[in-house]
Image (cartoon, grey):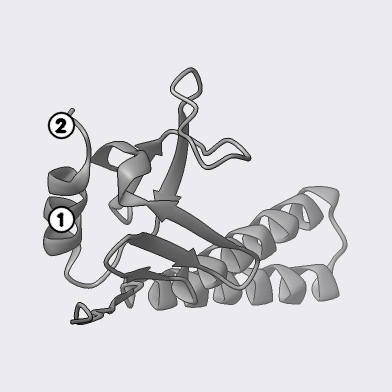
Amino acid sequence: MQEAQFTSTYPATSRYALLTSAGGVAALLCVWSLWRQFDWITVIFLCGCLFAAFSFAMQWRSMVELDPQGFWLRSPLRTQRVEFRQLDGAFEAGRMARGIVVTYHPLHANGLLDLDDLRSVTLPAVEQHAALLDLLVAKSSRSL
């Protein structure tokens, strides 16, 4: 018999929408200030506000999808796959939005784990954060 396939989707938390909006409002205030009087410092601040709004928007549109063998990190700019057998550990990180950092061993071309190399991927803060963290810690080869 075939094993039942399960897929769980963890969307990014709505806090990223608020942070994206705040960056957008700050950028609009910078544009208004530049329209009134040009200033290089305001141009630099505008660039920072646009970068922050863009970064938070990319996190807001990201999601983590779990399947029986591993997880996918899907975002507008990239899609990354990590299998559970690659996991080394998982832990929380971040200040404004607590994300999950997963450390893993990459795969060789022949499908074997490269135990000499350790990489990390940062997952966005998601709804049901504690459940995802517990699952990743349980699936990792060792807990940190």
Query: Which residue is rendered at x = 77% and y = 48% of the image?
Result: 41
* Residue 5 position (above or below residue 62): below
Q: Secondary structure at mark 1?
A: helix
Q: Quadrant of residue 143?
A: top left
Q: Name the image quarter holding the N terminus.
A: bottom left
Q: Earlier in the sequence, mark 2 or mark 1?
A: 1
Label 1 sits on what residue type?
A: Leu
Comparing 40 with 136, the one in front is 136
Residue 95 visible somewhere in the drawing: no
Comparing 11 with 15, the one in front is 11
Query: Which residue is rendered at x = 17% and y = 44% of the image?
Result: 137
Pointer 2 residue: 143
Drawn side of residue 11 relative to residue 3, left or right: right
Distance in Å between CA atoms under marks 2 and 1: 11 Å
x and y percent of residue 117 in the render?
Answer: 51, 23
Drawn side of residue 82 relative to residue 101, left or right: right
* Residue 65 position (above or below residue 87): below
* Residue 69 position (above or below residue 32): above
* Residue sitting at the far top: 116
Query: Which residue is rendered at x = 38% and y = 52% of the image?
Result: 83
Graded by Cα atoms within 10 Å as few (under 14), some (14 to 19) or many (20 or more), the crowding at tag 2 reads few
Query: Which residue is rendered at x = 21% and y = 34% of the image?
Result: 141
Graded by Cα atoms within 10 Å as few (under 14), some (14 to 19) or many (20 or more), the crowding at tag 1 reads few
Residue 19 visible somewhere in the drawing: yes
Q: Which mark is residue 135?
A: 1
Question: Could you tell me if the residues under marks 2 and 1 are in contact, i.e. CB atoms within 8 Å?
Answer: no
Label 2 sits on what residue type?
A: Ser
Comparing 89 with 86, the one in front is 86
x and y percent of residue 63 in the render?
Answer: 41, 72
Q: Name the image quarter holding the C terminus.
A: top left
Comparing 65 with 123, the one in front is 65
